[in-house]
Image (tube, coloured by chain):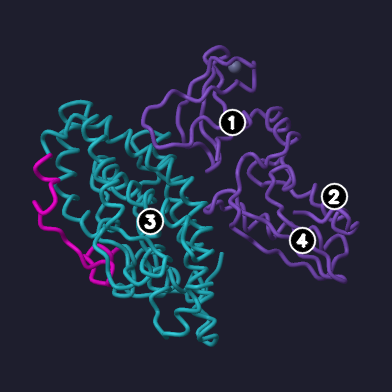
Chain colours: A cyan, B purple
Amino acid sequence: MIGEEEMNSTGKTFLTDYLLHLADDALILGHRNSEWCGHGPILEQDIALTNISLDLIGQARSLYQYAANILNESHPARNVSEDTLAYLRDNREFKNCLLVEMPNGDWAHTILRQFFFSTYQFFLYEKLVGSVNDTIAAISAKAIKEVTYHLRWSGEWVIRLGDGTDESKERLLKAFDMLWPFTGELFHMVEYEIVAADLGIGADLNLLRSKWDEKLKIVFQEAGILSIIENKIKPGSNWMQSGGKIGKHSEHLGFILAELQFMQRAYPNSEW
Amino acid sequence: MRNQVDISSAEISEILEEVMDPEIPVLSVNDLGIVRDISVKDKAVQVTITPTYMGCPAMDMIAATIKMTLLSHGFTDVSIRQVLSPAWTTDWISEKGKQKLLEYGIAPPNSKPQFCNTEFFTANEAVQCPHCSSWNTKRISEFGATACKALYQCADCKEPFDYFKCH
Ligand SMILES: [Zn+2]
């Protein structure tokens, strides 16, 4: 596999960094959504969101397993596993985007966060299906089928909220103002992404951006809010937050990890 | 694919009929189409399986059950390999499996998925009620009790039912 050879020959860790970034995005959003379990507005939507959590955590598992294999090949004594990667890394080692660690807020916040992310993930995996790295291509080919459902479900909800009552529209617009500054990071390429894209392993995110913009406009138009937010979504019209991909997180991630990692930290090596 | 000329692997395939999907206990792993390869070298048996959904919690249990079942049939060297590619699709559910789903009260996946795209509010996929065979059904939710199912309701007999959604 090109990715692994390249890494071994240059001694660079870009491939595992890239895998951890993809996995961390999926794990953290999966965890956030799982916080809704038992609290959804109606049973069917509660189940929908927990199903999406399960899909995301499943994607994270496959990516962590692959990353663990690579890490163990170079340092067998480290005995890395999907579990140690999820449960025993610290805040600064996580490479997820800031968007996915944002608090759930109300239903509109959760839906809009999911819609921003699923749209991004759909176009990302669409590209990664053609990765020169066979494992990434295989994971992406499976994941994109699931993400298609996530994108449609969240997009329909954005439309429903925007086109619903005055209150649902107001809440959606509030969520937009809160979350929009965290969307720029999705497409802001950091070093491991640039290297991965150059080698044909990863995706050139600049090429995904216009597709993402296009999908958003369709949905916001349908939701009846495009004219209200049109000026805000113009490129460069908003200060964008970033840093998550290189381990600089908001205070929220610490609280997520405190809960996510509690069992393994308190009772090391505990199992089901 | 399975090595048909090797009698031992055919025998093993026969034994795998006993291993059921824990979430849909009428379907064997063969019916589900997740057994991708069976290889027998000397006395070592390797069964290659592929997950339906990546987050499917049943996969680890299925892998363990296959191993236990083969061990209980006297095989001592058994390993289970999981592969992701090519990605599983509902097309791999056998005809027998689809029939079993129907009898169990789950609408089997339509053979021609009409539905796997990102268009919003598309017309509901036409799904036949497994109880009264009516086509007058509607989707309640795309996400059901497990990752592989959507929730439907029949407008004629009023019964809710699961649909094994296209994937
Ligand atoms: Zn009926």
Q: Name which residue type carries label 1.
A: Lys
Q: Measured along the vertical axis of the image, is residue A49 above or below residue B60?
A: above
The amino acid beneath tag 2 is Glu
Label annotation for residue B112: 1
- Determine contact: label 1, label 4, CB under 8 Å: no
Q: Is residue A38 above or below residue A27?
A: above
**Residue furthest top in the image:** B156
Q: Nearer the viewer, mark 2 or mark 4?
A: 2
The reply to whether callout 4 and callout 3 are in contact (CB within 8 Å) is no
Instruction: Give the side of residue A138 with respect to residue B66, left or right.
Output: left
Q: Distance between the residues labelled 2 and 1?
A: 29 Å
- Please determine if labels 3 and 2 lie on a single subunit: no
Can you identify the residue that label 4 sits on? B68
Question: Do pointers 2 and 4 mark residues of a single chain?
Answer: yes
Q: Is residue A184 magenta?
A: no
Look at discs 2 and 1 and give the one toward the viewer: 1
Marked residue chain, label 2: B
Name the residue: 26% across, 48% down. A210
Along the viewing direction, whichever of A270 and B28 lies nearer the viewer: B28
Q: What element carries label 3?
A: helix
Tell me where residue B91 appears, x and y as whole percent: 64, 39
Question: Which residues are drawn in magenta?
Answer: A230-255
Mark 3 and mark 2: Cα distance apart in space: 40 Å
* Mark 1 vs ligand 1: CB below 8 Å: no
- Residue drawn at x 29%, y 42% is A111
Q: Mark 4, residues whose alpha carbon is within 10 Å: few (<14), some, or many (≥20)?
A: some
Which quarter of the figure is the N terminus of chain B placed in?
Answer: bottom right
Which is closer to the viewer, label 1 or label 4? 1
Precedes in sequence: disc 2 or disc 4: 2
